[in-house]
Image (spheres, rainbow, N blue to C red):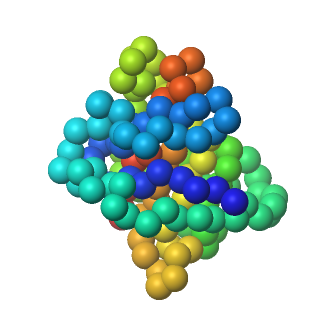
């Protein structure tokens, strides 16, 4: 099971994670937008990872698959590519996964993109809609 951070319409929501994968309760100070003010009040989204092999970059084609949720590969950008920089070391953050919100019931829209900086243990999430 995966219990991930929430994202909003700001450029990115940043949080620090521990070596065991847990996140600190407070958002990183680099998160600065009105939508993130009540993040802690929202319920956590718990999802189960199910093995469904696909070609490595299948999720980069918005018209090729019904659910663009992926672990690995490349992001399927709806708009311009928005790779965040780590707020501590300023390196471009690495992309491990994305969550296609259309897989939720009732169907939603948009994709949540996750990123991380292994040196600083900072995670980021951003969101795009078509």
**Can you see residue 68?**
no
Q: At 61% across and 60% down in the image, what residue appears?
A: 69
Image x and y of residue 98, in percent: 56, 52
Image x and y of residue 89, in percent: 42, 14
Image x and y of residue 67, in percent: 61, 69
Query: How many discs appear?
Result: 0
In the rendered image, the vertical position of residue 47 relative to residue 88, given as above or below: below
Location of the N terminus by quadrant is: bottom right
Q: At 39% across and 18% down in the image, what residue appears?
A: 88
Q: At 68% across and 44% down in the image, what residue appears?
A: 72
Farthest left residue?
34
Horizontal side of residue 14 vs 22, given as left or right: left
Horizontal side of residue 29 vs 73, given as left or right: left
Farthest bottom residue?
106
Location of the C terminus by quadrant is: bottom left
In the rendered image, the vertical position of residue 30 relative to residue 71, given as above or below: above
Q: At 77% across and 64% down in the image, what residue appears?
A: 50
Image x and y of residue 46, in percent: 59, 64
**Can you see residue 58?**
yes
């Amino acid at each position: 099971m995966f219990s991930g951070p929430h994202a909003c319409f700001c450029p990115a929501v940043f949080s620090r994670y521990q070596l065991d994968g847990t996140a600190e309760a407070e958002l990183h100070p680099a998160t600065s937008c009105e939508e993130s003010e009540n993040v802690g009040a929202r319920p956590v989204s718990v999802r189960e990872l199910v093995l469904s092999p696909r070609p490595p970059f299948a999720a980069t084609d918005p018209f090729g698959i019904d659910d663009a949720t992926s672990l690995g590969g490349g992001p399927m950008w709806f708009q311009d590519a928005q790779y965040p920089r780590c707020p501590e070391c300023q390196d471009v953050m690495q992309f491990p996964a994305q969550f296609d919100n259309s897989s939720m019931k009732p169907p939603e829209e948009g994709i949540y993109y996750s990123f991380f900086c292994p040196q600083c243990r900072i995670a980021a999430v951003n969101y795009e809609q078509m």
